[in-house]
């Protein structure tokens, strides 16, 4: 609820607050809620997530990481390229 009181719009928060206010006698219809609140909020969350989170992660980590050779791949395909051999990670259960 603090997220909402700070003035941020989030589709999950709105999925609770707006139907609750409709049950309590809010002066709007279901379609007004969907068109004027839920769709813009979902689209804004998607754009914000892709642009403000996804692209910075891509430009700082994916594009700058070294190329890896995967097991079972033909080594002739990557001949002459500098790469790091990727060792498969093993999970050990701590007992």
Image (cartoon, rainbow, N blue to C red):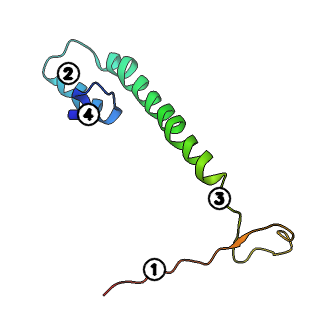
Residue at figure coordinates x 69%, y 77% from the top left: 71
Query: Marks 4/3: CA distance?
Result: 35 Å
Residue 17: image quadrant is top left
Labels 1 & 3 near each other (Cβ < 8 A)? no
The disc at residue 91 is: 1
Establish if 28 lies above or below 65.
Answer: above
The residue carrying mark 3 is 65
The answer to whether marks 4 and 3 mark residues whose Cβ atoms lie closer than 8 Å is: no
User: Which numbered circle lies on residue 3?
Assistant: 4
62 to 75, vertically: above or below: above
Residue at image coords 16%, 24%: 23
User: Residues under labels 2 and 1: Cα distance?
Assistant: 50 Å
Q: Identify residue for label 2.
A: 22
Question: Residue 25: x, y in percent?
Answer: 14, 17
Q: Kindly report the distance in space between the C-alpha atoms of the residues bearing marks 4 and 2.
A: 21 Å
Q: Quadrant of residue 88?
A: bottom right
Tag 2 secondary structure: helix
Q: How far apart, in angstroms, are the residues tagged by discs 1 and 3?
A: 23 Å
Question: Residue 33: where, in percent of width, then height?
Answer: 32, 20
Element marked by disc 3? loop
Residue 64: x %, y % from top left: 66, 54
């Amino acid at each position: 609820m603090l997220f909402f009181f700070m003035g941020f719009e989030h589709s999950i928060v709105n999925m609770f607050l707006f139907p609750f206010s409709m049950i309590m006698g809010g002066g709007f219809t279901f379609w007004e809620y969907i068109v004027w609140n839920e769709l813009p909020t979902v689209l804004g969350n998607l754009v914000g997530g892709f642009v403000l989170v996804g692209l910075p992660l891509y430009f700082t980590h994916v594009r700058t990481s070294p190329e890896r050779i995967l097991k079972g791949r033909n080594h002739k395909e990557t001949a002459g390229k500098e790469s790091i051999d990727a060792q498969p990670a093993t999970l050990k259960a701590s007992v």
